[in-house]
Image (spheres, grey):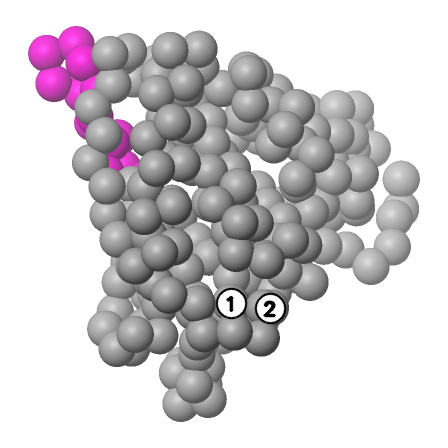
Amino acid sequence: MNGRGRHGRVWHSGLANCLTLSVLWRFDRDLTHLAGLSLVVGLAIVRSLRFFSAEDIRLKWPNDIIFNNEKLAGILTEIKSIDGSAFAVIGIGINFYLPDSLRLLINQDITDLYQITGRYLNRNHLLGSLLSELRSTLEDFDRYGFQIFKDEWTKNHAYEDCFVSLKLPTGERIDGIVRGVNDAGALNLATCNGEHSYNIGDVSLRLKSII
């Protein structure tokens, strides 16, 4: 089965290999107040997975969950507005057990919950936990915005204080050290030209700093 990821990428999954779902959520706020949505969804996933012995998983800005720099889960959010109120379709994919035949189709470093925990986890149990955590998290996000999650998100960011390369949709690359995120969920980078915030792009680690 092929799902859709960011920038038109394909999310590959097979029967019982992954947990893939979409959640529709209606907000009382308008679009201008929903910055950071994908970040708080990632935080909800991390909180939920830690109940299942996946203790060392981390967030990767803006919408990946990783373990030892390998991708475990991903998020895709689509937001629209109707008559002044906003709603979002939140797509989530979590790898449970990926056979070699499926791994060959994926062109990045990946992992799954079986590799992390050494157990075949019950997808229904995890789904129930995740939906409960999502409800609580999204209710708080709708009420208070991203600001109340910012410190917790930063503590769980795998690349905090690391030297990274940010690739923008234009193809431009910007190197810098990660210095948290701002109140809207944009990534703060300390670069040779000062500190700047970016709300879009793909982040990858760099081996050494030039700053």
**Within-10-Å neighbours for mark 1: few <14, some 14–19, many 20+:** many
The answer to whether residue 20 is above or below residue 112 is above
Locate residue 54 relative to residue 145 in the image: left or right. right
11 or 117, nearer to the observer = 117
Residue 172 visible in the picture: no
Evaluate if marks 1 and 2 touch, with contact meaning CB atoms under 8 Å apart.
yes
To which residue does mark 1 refer? 113
Instruction: Say which quadrant the C terminus sits in.
Output: top right
The answer to whether residue 168 is above or below residue 104 is above
Q: Residue at x 43, y 67 (%)?
A: 121
Residue 17: image quadrant is: bottom left
Spot occupied by residue 190 in the image (x, y as percentages of width and height): 78, 30
To which residue does mark 2 refer? 116
Q: Amino acid at mark 1?
A: Leu
Q: Residue at x 44, y 15 (%)?
A: 145
Q: Residue at x 32, y 41 (%)?
A: 131
Locate residue 201 relative to residue 3 in the image: left or right. right
Q: Residue at x 49, y 19 (%)?
A: 146
Q: Amino acid at mark 2?
A: Ile
Residue 1 visible in the picture: yes
Dot 2: element: helix
Spot occupied by residue 157 in the image (x, y as percentages of width and height): 66, 41
The answer to whether residue 114 is above or below residue 154 is below
Locate residue 12 relative to residue 194 in the image: left or right. left
The residue most toward the left is 83
Dot 1: element: helix
- Kindly report the distance in space between the C-alpha atoms of the residues bearing marks 1 and 2: 5 Å
> From which residue to which does the magenta span run?
77-89
- Residue 52 lies within the magenta run: no
Spot occupied by residue 86 in the image (x, y as percentages of width and height): 21, 20
- Residue 80 lies within the magenta run: yes
